[in-house]
Every structure is written in C-alpha cells, then in structure tokens.
Image: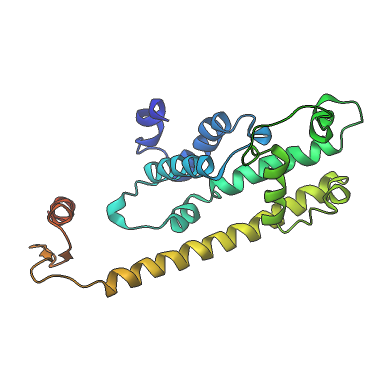
C-alpha cells in the first residue's frame, strides 16, 4: 500500500475509480490470497476490516475530521466490507470442496474426523467448519441442506452473492443504529460550564482543546 502512494494514491492524474481498481488488483488480491481456507476469529476480522477502511479513506482522501461513517466510505468506493469479502471467499471455496470427487485431500480434510486423541480442557479451538457455518447463517443459507445448493456451481454462486448482499445491508443498518445511539448519548451528556471551545472562524463548538486545535488547522486551510 505504501509503495503505491506516490505513483497511484497521491497521483492527481488518476481518477478515484482507477485507484480503487488498482487497490482491488494489487492490495486486496495479495492481502486475501488463500483466505478461502482461513479460520479467523472475530477480532482478526475486525483488524482486517480496520486496515481495509483505512486504505479506502486514504484513496478517497477522507480524514477522521470529515466525520464520514464507514457505510458512506464503502458506498463511495463501491466495495463491500472486509467481512463480506472474507465470507464470500470462504463460501466459494467451501462449495468448491464439496463438489470435489471423493478421495481428494481437501475434501477428506473437510469431512474427516479424528478417531483417537484428546484435547485440553476449555473452549474448543475454532474450526473451519464453525466459521463456514457462521457464514451460512449470516448469508441466510440453511446449514442443513447447503450441500444440495452447492452441488450446482452457478446456483451456489448466486445464493452466496444474494445472501451476502442481504447480510451487508443488515450490517449497515446495525452500524447506523449504533451510530445514532452514540450521537444520542453524546447529546444527552451534561457539559460543564466553559467546557466548549469555540472556533474563531466558523463559531463551531468543540468539546476539548485538542479538538479545537485540530479543527482550527483544517478550518484555516479551507477558508484561506
């Protein structure tokens, strides 16, 4: 990502659409290589999504001071969230393995079970099957008959795309509700007398001195 900063991301001669295409071809393809077989915890997916959003904000020239939510950033870039990208790649590989002939190593690893052995006490380690089952539920695909749907390659691809689009919409709605709750709590929070700091240029009220300092720098650069 950093090596393409001067040539691509900061290049005024390239359109935003071109930069996004380069990001998909060079950055995402390298970052998510082999991700169809990854077993990720939620915290790891959140870290990947954080990197994903930071890259898109860099490409779109959106800073934290603009107060643009992630939903709008994804809409401007025309790219789904990292959660949807990971789920789509996993489910595509999941269906591909299920269509393999018996005796193939990937299929034996997917359906095989250990006859002997023991595990330490505590919560079991997250398995690839568990992650795929979670993706199936998120995508509104019945885990009981997913193999029947996956037997048809085109039908499976359509079901995965349709399910992930619905899940992405639900995720955006949840983000919006959480954002509204945060704004309501911030508006209802009591403020001490003299706690607000007013910008001398636009008369905007800031809640802290560092916020006023950061806002003043940006406000002065836009008004000059």
Where 116 sits versus 189, above or below?
Answer: above
Observer-nearest of 20 and 80: 80
Q: Is residue 120 left or right of residue 22?
A: right
Where 64 sits versus 112, above or below?
Answer: below
Q: Residue furthest bottom?
A: 188
Quadrant of the snapshot with the N terminus: top left
Q: Residue at 76% of width from left, 48% of height from top? A: 157
Q: Is residue 197 left or right of residue 74?
A: left
State the count of labels: 0
Q: Residue at 65% of width from left, 32% of height from top? A: 120
Instruction: State the image quarter where residue 37 is shown.
Output: top right
Observer-nearest of 150 and 117: 117
Where 218 sits versus 9, above or below?
Answer: below
Observer-nearest of 6 and 129: 129
Q: Is residue 205 left or right of residue 76?
A: left
Q: Residue at 31% of width from left, 51% of height from top? A: 64
Observer-nearest of 191 and 61: 191
Q: Report x, y in % for residue 87.
A: 65, 45
Instruction: State the image quarter where residue 92 is shown.
Output: top right
User: Coloured how?
Assistant: rainbow
Where 178 sits versus 151, above or below?
Answer: below
Q: Report x, y in % for residue 175.
A: 48, 61
Q: Residue at 70% of width from left, 55% of height from top? A: 137
Q: Report x, y in % for residue 221.
A: 16, 50
Q: Residue furthest right?
A: 102
Q: Is residue 120 left or right of residue 178?
A: right
Q: Report x, y in % for residue 174.
A: 51, 64
């Amino acid at each position: 990502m950093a090596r393409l900063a001067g040539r691509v991301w900061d290049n005024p001669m390239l359109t935003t659409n071109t930069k996004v295409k380069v990001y998909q071809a060079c950055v995402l393809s390298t970052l998510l290589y082999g991700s169809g077989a990854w077993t990720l915890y939620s915290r790891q997916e959140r870290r990947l999504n954080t990197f994903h959003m930071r890259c898109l904000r860099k490409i779109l020239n959106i800073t934290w001071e603009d107060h643009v939510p992630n939903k709008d950033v994804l809409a401007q870039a025309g790219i789904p969230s990292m959660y949807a990208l990971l789920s789509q790649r996993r489910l595509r590989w999941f269906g591909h393995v299920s269509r393999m002939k018996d005796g193939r190593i990937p299929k034996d690893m997917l359906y095989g079970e250990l006859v002997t052995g023991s595990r330490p006490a505590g919560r079991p380690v997250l398995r690839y099957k568990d992650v795929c089952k979670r993706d199936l539920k998120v995508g509104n695909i019945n885990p009981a008959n997913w193999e029947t749907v996956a037997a048809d390659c085109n039908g499976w691809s359509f079901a995965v795309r349709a399910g992930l689009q619905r899940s992405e919409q639900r995720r955006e709605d949840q983000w919006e509700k959480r954002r509204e709750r945060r704004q309501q709590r911030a508006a209802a929070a009591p403020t001490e007398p003299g706690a607000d700091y007013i910008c001398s240029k636009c008369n905007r009220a800031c809640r802290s001195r560092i916020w006023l300092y950061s806002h003043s720098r940006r406000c002065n650069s836009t008004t000059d």
